[in-house]
Amino acid sequence: MPIYEYSCPECTHEFSARRSMSDADAPIVCPQCGDEGPRRGLSLFATVGAAASRGSHSGATSGGCGSCAGGSCGSCGH
């Protein structure tokens, strides 16, 4: 079941909800303020393929550590 991101226009709280695709745009209650008008936003997602298992990512820049999605991250200093 997919996870969707929502934003409440009343209190600006952002939250995730695991819902079926058919319920993605159905009304949902904000867990913070109880408003019934949160809107679904864009969700980020990741995929893992054969390149990731070998330690390289497409789009990685040279000098990256291989575990960083863009060849740059705070954990390795690249």
Image: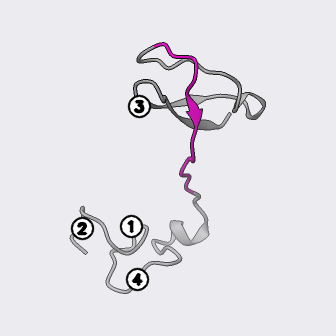
Please, what is the three-letter code of the amino acid marked with disc 2? Cys
> What is the CA distance from the residue labelled 4 to the residue labelled 3?
36 Å
Label 4, secondary structure: give it: loop
**Residue 33 in magenta?**
no
Please, what is the three-letter code of the amino acid marked with disc 3? Thr
Relative height, residue 73 to residue 9 (above, below): below
x then y, percent, for residue 68:
38, 67
Please, what is the three-letter code of the amino acid marked with disc 4? Thr
Q: Nearer the viewer, residue 19 or 50?
A: 19
Instruction: Write down the residue under mark 3.
Output: 12
Q: Earlier in the sequence, mark 1 or mark 2?
A: 1
The residue located at (33%, 74%) in the rendering is: 65
Instruction: Write down the residue under mark 1.
Output: 67
Relative height, residue 25 to residue 35 (above, below): below
Drawn side of residue 35 relative to residue 76, left or right: right
Q: Earlier in the sequence, mark 2 or mark 4?
A: 4
Q: Going by the picture, which residue comes out furthest to the front? A: 10
Between label 2 and label 4, give the one nearer the viewer: 4
Label 1, secondary structure: give it: loop
Quarter in which the C terminus is drawn: bottom left
Relative height, residue 64 to residue 12 (above, below): below
Instruction: Write down the residue under mark 4.
Output: 61
Q: Going by the picture, which residue comes out furthest to the right? A: 22
The residue located at (57%, 42%) in the rendering is: 41
> What is the CA distance from the residue labelled 3 to the residue labelled 1?
33 Å
Q: Quadrant of residue 51?
A: bottom right
> What is the CA distance from the residue labelled 4 to the residue labelled 1?
12 Å
> What is the CA distance from the residue labelled 2 to the residue labelled 4?
14 Å
Q: Nearer the viewer, residue 15 or 39?
A: 39
Residue bounds of the magenta highlight: 34-46
Instruction: Write down the residue under mark 2.
Output: 76
x then y, percent, for residue 72:
32, 72
